[in-house]
Amino acid sequence: LALIGLAGGVALFIGPRWNRAEALQLVNEAALPGACQETRYTRFHDSQDRQRPLIILLHGLTNCPWEMNDLATALFDAGHDVMVPRVPGHGTTSSDLETLNRADLLAFETQLIARAHGRSDHVYLLGTSFGGIIAIHAAQLFPQYVRGVLLLSPFLATAYDSILSVACAEI
């Protein structure tokens, strides 16, 4: 079975083989929230205090930062700096998702952690579903910068060499 995500956080499991074209058609037909065009979900307090925790929220497959808006607002109001990046290929069209590959995700993780560590010595990752895969992988790559990881309904597999390979595999 293979995981296919749809906009709005809905996920389906289909067939013994993932038909990528069929999956992308389903994603394309799903309505993305207009809020996915918003990019103002990252919030920093004015302080340059490197001891202030910075929490990175990573959205699920085919979704966008809008998915994390309420949580980002609550964390910011509680005194934390918050980053809510758009994962490459997400929140736009299925053709953007279709071209996503492992190199894109590795570059995204590297840039994200470098930017976060440039602001805070206390970086935490919170990922939901596909965002959980990214959070775990980034923490594995950069344990010296990531203080903790919280996963919400992560998609995990143990039969693969790398969790990230699941995200980019064409079965």
Image (cartoon, helix red, strand yellow):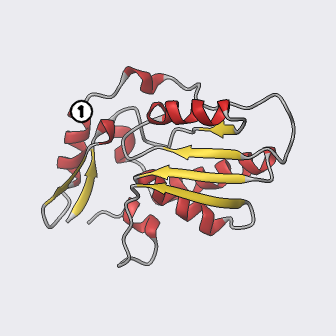
Residue nearer the viewer, 111 or 150: 150
x and y, in percent, of residue 123 in the image: 71, 52
Up/down of 19 relative to 64, above or below: below
Q: Is residue 164 left or right of residue 144?
A: left
Q: Give whichever of 165, 55 is nearer the camera.
A: 55
Direction from residue 153 to residue 117 in the image, left or right: right
Rendered residue at 32%/41% (across/down): 9
- Residue at (26, 52) in percent of width and height: 4
Specify the amino acid type for callout 1.
Answer: Ala
Q: Pick whichever, 77 or 146, lies toward us.
A: 77
The secondary structure type at the circle numbered 1 is loop
Residue 116 at what x, y percent from top left?
72, 47
Horizontal placement of 10 versus 156: left or right?
Answer: left
Q: Nearer the viewer, residue 10 or 114?
A: 10
Q: Name which quarter of the figure residue 31 lies in.
A: top left
Measured as percent of width and height from the top left, residue 26 is found at 20, 41
The C terminus - image quarter? bottom left
Where is residue 149? Give x, y as percent.
Answer: 58, 59
From the image, which quarter does the N terminus lie in? Answer: bottom left
Mark 1 lies on residue: 30
